[in-house]
Image (cartoon, helix red, strand yellow):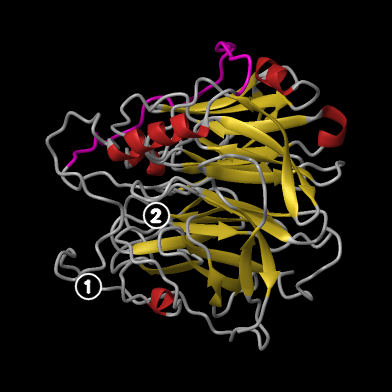
Amino acid sequence: MPTERRPASMGCVRGRSLPGALFTGRFPGWSAGLRLGVVMRAATLMALLTASGCDDTSSAPFDPIGRPADAAVAPQMPEPESDPTPEPEPAPEQPLQLDFVPIEHDAGALRITDLAFLPGTDGEFVVLDKDGDVIHMRLDGDGAIRLGAFRLDDVWSESDAGLISVAVDPDFAQNRFIYLGYTPSRQASVIRRYRLAGDHDAVPASAVDVFAAEEPRAPRSWHNIGKMGFDDDGVLWALFGDKVIDENAADPHSPLGALVRLVPLPEGGFDVPPDNPYLDGSGHPTVYAKGFRSPWTGFWWRGSFVLGDVGLDRFEEINRIDAPGLNFGWPDFEGPCPAGDCAGTEPPWLSYGRGGSDRFVLDDPQATSSRLRSVWVAPPRATDAGPDPYDGRWDEVMLFGDAFVGYVRGRSMGGGESWPVGHLHFATAFATGPDGYVYATALGTWPVDAPVVPSPILRAVPTER
């Protein structure tokens, strides 16, 4: 979850990265249950966010991600066009429009980072709290009720880091497996498997290590594991940021700054699918695509991966990966290829500017004033889930937006012009429920000076404006 950026004056070690991936058989000690109070977690949150970045001993200036919208303090560089990617097709005549309506719930989480419905259940789902809680919920009437929870005691939750993502095993109805992606330290991101069955307090003890990516040189807790999921062949995919070491994104031997694909093994660890591009030893065997900076959200849809990559200075990117072995250019450039040689790299599917005068900001009357930017993407509605309250308008439409500014836009998966859909501040996850509605989550207590409130769970309700 990107929140800040490496100071521009901080040097990077150039050359091939250190070995980036491992899986181990070590299991940390686990607590006997979830007993933290909301007030204590709120106090911890305030302390972490206020002190974010203070553990760096460098004297370099500390700058937020994205450049200020105020031109008086903005870096002196040309403002990019809102969308330099051609969009030849017009928006639909009756496009998707949404209101995000909070539902009543008792999850008690301050910073929900992900949401996943559990197949074969009566509306059950899990939400993740960034500080390490996994909360088991069920839809109940117009709201949701808490069924139980467990806590991961070794979650490092400073800044971007924490308990970030969940993937549900394709055979969950039989094996009850879920996979959690989180950071146990500033340097590492891990994927571990758990069995969600019976006593919630016993779930942590079922942990099985699947994959880990480490960067011992990481200067800050940024650009970690992002979203993950399963494709149609049962292959687990996951997004990894570059850990603020730029060269990782360009090095095929590193799983950082990459989209990785792997097959979890029953006993732990992983195998690699036969169509990964580096099985000949020319790169890390799990790597499928490279050239990403901070890809914290993404999805799989009908043979393609789509991800949002948070930019450094000028552009936010949405990238579509249709083939193995593609490189999307970071750290050589962000956004569309500048004048020069970009051979061997792919252009973004969509890119746009990060300034306060960007048309996506101006299109949203509820836009939140912020110097920060963080692109997110969300998949089309699952068409096999219950009745369709959206009359087909969300069937082949992805959403994207900015976490800090709050605008939400739609775009056909066939390309074309995007359009305003609604507004949701710091959206973190979207998932289609068994009732046919799409549900969303957002951070609750954010920014640091905001009132301490739990994260909302919201139902996306069709509307017309």
Which numbered disc covers residue 78? 1
Q: Position of residue 188 (x, y in %)?
A: 44, 27
Q: Position of residue 374 (x, y in %)?
A: 41, 56
Tell how many labels: 2
> What's the mark number on residue 329?
2
Residue mark closest to the camera, 1 vs 2 = 1
Q: What element does badge 1 sit on?
A: loop
Does the stretch in magenta take in 11?
yes
Residue name at image x 57 percent, y 33 percent? 181
Q: Would residue 244 be seen by someone viewing this image from the given angle?
A: yes
- Up-down: is 213 above or below 113? above
Q: Magenta segment range? A: 10-34
Tell me: residue 330, above or below residue 169: below
Q: Tell me the crowding category of disc 2: few under 14, some 14 to 19, or many 20 or more residues within 10 angstroms, Cα based.
A: many
Residue located at (39% from left, 33% from top): 43
Residue 353 rendering spot, x and y as whole percentages? 35, 69
The majority secondary structure of the magenta stretch comes to loop
Q: Position of residue 372 (x, y in %)?
A: 33, 58
Q: Is residue 273 visible?
A: no
Q: Would residue 283 be found to the left or right of residue 269 on screen? A: left
Foreground of the two, 233 or 346: 233
* Residue ID at (63%, 38%): 166
Q: Amino acid at mark 1?
A: Pro
Amino acid type at image mark 2: Gly
**Any magenta on residue 97?**
no
Up-down: is 13 above or below 267? below
Secondary structure of the residue carrying numbered label 2? loop
Q: Residue at x 43, y 56 (%)?
A: 344
Q: Residue furthest bottom?
A: 93
Out of 456 and 158, give the one closest to the viewer.
456
